[in-house]
Image (cartoon, coloured by chain):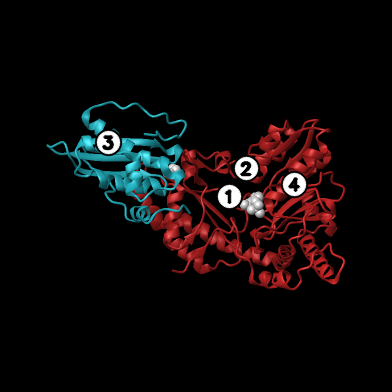
Amino acid sequence: MERIYMDNAATTATDPTVLEEMKPYFTEVYGNPSSFHSFGREARDAVREARDKVADLISADDAKEIVFTSGGTESDNYAIKGVAEELKDKGKHIITSSIEHHAVLHTCEYLEDKGFDVTYLPVDEDGLVDPADVKDAIREDTILITIMLANNEVGTIQPISEISEIAQENDITIHTDAVQAVGSIPVDVNELNVDLLSLSGHKFHSPKGIGALYIRQGTRIEKYLHGGAQERGRRATTENVAGIVGLGKAAQIAGQNLEEKQAKITQLRDKLIDGILEEIDEIKLNGHRTKRLPGNVNFSIRYIEGESILMKLDLAGIAASSGSACTSGSLEASHVLLAMGLSAEVAHGSLRLSLSKYNTEEDIDKVLNVLPEVVSDLRAMSPIYNQD
Amino acid sequence: MMDYSDKVMDHFENPRNVGEIEDADGVGQVGNPSCGDIMKMYIKVDDDNKISDVKFKTFGCGAAIATSSITTELVKGKTLDEAKELSNQAVAEALGGLPDVKMHCSNLAADALRKAINNYLGIETEEEDDFHCHHQHG
Ligand SMILES: Cc1ncc(COP(=O)(O)O)c(C=O)c1O
Ligand code: FES
């Protein structure tokens, strides 16, 4: 059976060009970038080049502002804990939103345990944070604002430049988790005017386990890993050279004709959204209709539950995801959908289909062909669906 | 995706005894939509106190659907006393096992069935605590 991958918000396929670029860095150019000899220099050059490419993709002024990490989770941890540790004598208040990825939310909860105070801002029914709420939440002791650029579940894109203006007026450090945005929409750290920005390679066709934290020059932040002098002493450990080369190549590819690719994926997304709305009744599009990631489609389908939708789709060869997850005691509805005001019942019926540059028109047609039947099968089984 | 056994997948793909019984002798429902699962069982009881027919409707995860289906198979033709004894372990075993995090779902089907039997027998069952979404462990 030919399978269709529509879970690109979870992770993407590594671009074969990226893989080719990485290959020599395992068995040929295997030197330690810190080493004096030519082996080391070759690796050093490769890392420098990759850093330039990543800096380019997000329009950073200086490649020194890029610190390579193991991915989005580490970048978020580094940014938030690093600022909290550095500025704890100045204040202990952090502002975030209630729809952040767990990499941010659980880090904030950890800091709450350590005596920090965190404000979790609400969002509207489209998943948007109101900049006025950010302003109202600011206190004397606020040291950090961390709000994601684009949401991983519903794709809503936040007004970060407006929020950073407020941060700047109040002299507060601002971080954004741009893991879902980088590589899929234009991201410019100066336009966004943020001090810190997280990105992760595996969301835009580089391998898993490599990412970066952008740290604007002059930002006060504690080191993350203590040890050698790698990454200017901010994150010790011998560099993941092949991964870094892969991230650099993926960044370069992502930046080429970005708007064109974005338009093409947006068009597929809209075809999928419109088609689903046409074919299936009693469903709701989650997330903002236009201020959303080009590849994100998220629906709540009434009267049925997410996992069983995923199972039926998987059997038909379609890989998707849902905001309904079974934990050991019960099913848990997505914190994002609940924060957007959905009832738990409706949140349980959520389905996310996320596209990448590798999805085609035929993929969309297949989903539009399969999904209505999946839904009607499950609804026929549902005790809360009224068939009349 | 969960690592379900072939048996679970079979019952999920081809659920047995789905539907309603118009003139059911007993009906039982457990769960709550806000918890992500509801199970409803319908039974017909014959003169020998045996379950002559049973049907279900389920809103829930894959395990919920498969456990409902196997439960109907396990109790069809059984006496009410035998059917009442059905444990969630027996349900899970008949499915070739369930992933650990999914075990709680196997309680639902047996609970719904017991409720349907009690309904037939005219016994009031206590309402579950619907607020916490913790399935009763039997
Ligand atoms: C918004 C967001 N932040 C952080 C992460 C974590 O990234 P990683 O898997 O690279 O640690 C993800 C990906 O799951 C994400 O979508
Ligand atoms: S809700 Fe069915 S097993 Fe968790």
Q: Are marks 1 and 3 in contact (CB under 8 Å)?
A: no
Q: Earlier in the sequence, mark 2 or mark 1?
A: 2
Please give the label number shown on residue A78.
4
Colour assigned to chain B in the rendering is cyan
Where residue A239 sits: x, y (%)? 76, 60
Look at 45% across and 35% down and name the residue there: B133
Q: Which residue is mark 1?
A: A153
Mark 2 and mark 1: span between their CA atoms? Answer: 9 Å
Please give the label number shown on residue A83.
none
Q: Quadrant of residue A17?
A: bottom right
Q: Which residue is mark 3?
A: B85
Amino acid beneath label 1: Glu
Q: Earlier in the sequence, mark 4 or mark 2?
A: 4
SS at badge 4: helix
- Horizontally, is A358 left or right of A97 in the view? left
Q: Are marks 2 and 1 on the same chain?
A: yes
Q: Quadrant of residue A25?
A: bottom right
Q: Which residue is mark 2?
A: A99
What chain letter is assigned to the residue under label 1? Answer: A
Mark 1 and mark 3: span between their CA atoms? Answer: 43 Å
Circle 3 Cα neighbour tier, 10 Å, few/some/many (<14 / 14–19 / ≥20)? few
- For the image, the number of numbered tags is 4
Look at 29% across and 40% down and name the residue there: B41
What chain letter is assigned to the residue under label 2? Answer: A
Task: Identify the chain drawn in red.
Answer: A
Instruction: Looking at this view, name the residue that lies furthest to the left.
Output: B47
Q: Are marks 2 and 1 in contact (CB under 8 Å)?
A: yes
Mark 1 and mark 4: span between their CA atoms? Answer: 23 Å
Where residue A299 sits: x, y (%)? 51, 50
